[in-house]
């Protein structure tokens, strides 16, 4: 759920960020083991062969312009300026082989690199 009551930015209504149950459980696990963590910050940066990559960092302090999306206590903090690029993204936590990772299903992403790490819009 978005804490920003107006839910408006650049005259757009955001669909927001969808947090799967498995992603929610992983974030809560991280918070339980380090109580000073408020949640995770989802950001993107220009990188990779397709153009952008997702960046996750822990949040120790909320910024005044953060949009916060929450699922049963598991929070993602997002800067308003990247919302047009990730609006409607579903965040999941999955196992692939022996690895566990956060996966992003972004309806705005058009192309992906061969390894699946970077994307373009």
Image: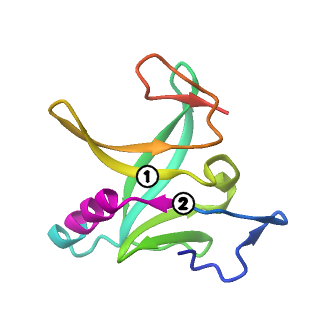
Q: What residue do we see at 20% from left, 65% from top?
A: 29
Q: Is residue 114 magenta?
A: no
Tell me: residue 5, above or below residue 61: below
Quarter of the figure with residue 74:
bottom left
Mark 1 in CB contact with mark 2 (< 8 angstroms): yes
Residue 114 location (% of width, % of height): 45, 16
Answer whether residue 2 is visible to the viewer in this image: yes
Q: Which residue is mark 2?
A: 17
Tell me: residue 23, above or below residue 44: below
Residue 119 lies left or right of residue 58; in this view the side is right
Residue 67 location (% of width, % of height): 58, 69
Label 2 secondary element: loop
Residue 115 lies left or right of residue 113; in this view the side is left
Toward the right, the furthest residue is: 11
Residue 112 location (% of width, % of height): 54, 24
Label 1 secondary element: strand
Tell me: residue 85, above or below residue 114: below
Residue 97 lies left or right of residue 53; in this view the side is left
Q: Nearer the viewer, residue 121 or 92?
A: 92
Q: What residue do we see at 35% from left, 73% from top?
A: 38
Q: How was this image coloured?
A: rainbow
Magenta segment's dominant SS is helix
Q: Is residue 22 magenta?
A: yes
**Which label number is shown at residue 91?**
1
């Amino acid at each position: 759920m978005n804490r920003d009551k107006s839910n408006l930015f650049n005259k757009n209504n955001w669909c927001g960020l969808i947090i799967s149950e498995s992603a929610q459980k992983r974030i809560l696990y991280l918070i339980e083991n380090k109580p000073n963590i408020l949640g995770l910050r989802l950001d993107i940066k220009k990188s990779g062969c397709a153009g952008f990559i997702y960046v996750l960092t822990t949040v120790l302090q909320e910024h005044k312009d953060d949009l916060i999306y929450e699922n049963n206590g598991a929070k993602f903090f997002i800067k308003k300026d990247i919302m047009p690029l990730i609006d409607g993204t579903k965040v999941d936590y999955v196992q692939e082989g022996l690895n566990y990772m956060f996966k992003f299903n972004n309806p705005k992403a058009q192309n992906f690199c061969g390894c699946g790490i970077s994307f373009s819009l």
